[in-house]
Image (cartoon, rainbow, N blue to C red):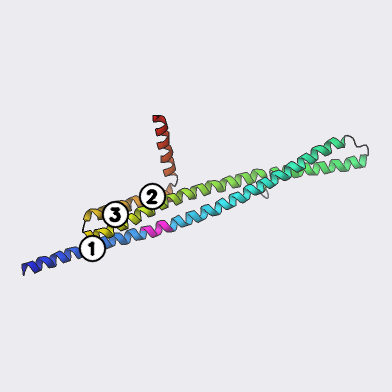
Amino acid sequence: MSEQMEHAEHVEHAAHSNKKIALVIAVLALFLAFSETLGKGAQTAALSENIEASDLWAFFQAKTIRQTILRTAGEFKTIELAAIADPAAKAAMGKQIDTWKKTIDRYESDPESKEGRKELTERARDLEHHRDTNLAKYENYEMASAAFQIGIVLASASVITGMLALVWGAAGLGLIGLMFTGFGLFAPETLEHLQQMVEHMTAAGH
């Protein structure tokens, strides 16, 4: 009778323990879903911003080519202008040169349309900065997802083996995953800064 009671107590204890492990697995799975969703969003945003930045740089190059063509044409016409004797023809050519100069200036900077070379450069660099930030977020979320996934595996293994140390390991990985998720949300460039510090220290050691 006592053996049956002990066995029942053991089964009850195991069941209670398994419920706790199941709860740990459920929490880790929830965090994993969040980190993967955030990571996918950051990756999509980075790809979109990279395409937009490339388009703006292509537009910048087109503006530069047009500007160079007009500037060269204007310089040639300015040389020809000195040799023209007819006042009407000279005035017409001078007007054309002035029009080209205004167009060249507009190609350089156009605050209204924000399509001058200056504005295009600022917009492209701003997009590149956002792209780099989103890529950094994505890397953090990927690290977080990996930690959560390994944590789930360890917690699942503890159900089979009965080793509670695996549950503690899973919980520890869950905390690491949360840390990387926090980096992704609030300080995405932390990992890059740490890497640069390590590289700097390594270089200084040599």
Identify the residue at horizontal 38%, vertical 55% (top origin).
Answer: 145
Can you tell which quarter of the image residue 202 is in? Answer: top left
- Local SS, label 2: helix
Q: Could you tell me what secondary structure mostly forms the magenta stretch?
A: helix
Alpha-carbon distance for marks 2 and 3?
A: 15 Å
Quadrant the N terminus occupies:
bottom left
Nearer-the-camera pick, 123 or 37 = 37
Residue 124 x %, y %: 59, 47
Q: What range of the chain is rendered magenta? A: 31-36
Left or right of residue 78, residue 46 in this image: left
Identify the residue at horizontal 37%, vertical 53% (top origin).
Answer: 146
- In the rendered image, residue 35 lying in the magenta stretch gets the answer yes
Can you tell which quarter of the image residue 109 is in? Answer: top right
Alpha-carbon distance for marks 1 and 2?
A: 28 Å
Q: Name which residue type carries label 2.
A: Phe
Q: Is residue 114 visible?
A: no
- Local SS, label 1: helix
Of callouts 2 and 3, which one flags the residue occurring earlier in the amino acid sequence? 3
Mark nearest the camera among 1 and 2 is 1
Count neighbours of disc 2 (C-alpha within 10 A) and say few if under 14, some if 14 to 19, many if 20 or more.
Answer: many
Alpha-carbon distance for marks 3 and 1?
A: 14 Å
- In the rendered image, residue 66 lying in the magenta stretch gets the answer no
**Residue 18, which numbered label?**
1
Residue 139 x %, y %: 44, 50
Q: Which residue is mark 3?
A: 170
Left or right of residue 95, residue 194 in this image: left
Residue 78 x %, y %: 83, 37
Q: Are marks 2 and 3 in contact (CB under 8 Å)?
A: no
**Residue 180, which numbered label?**
2
> Can you say whether 121 is above or below 40 in the image?
above
Q: Are marks 1 and 2 in contact (CB under 8 Å)?
A: no
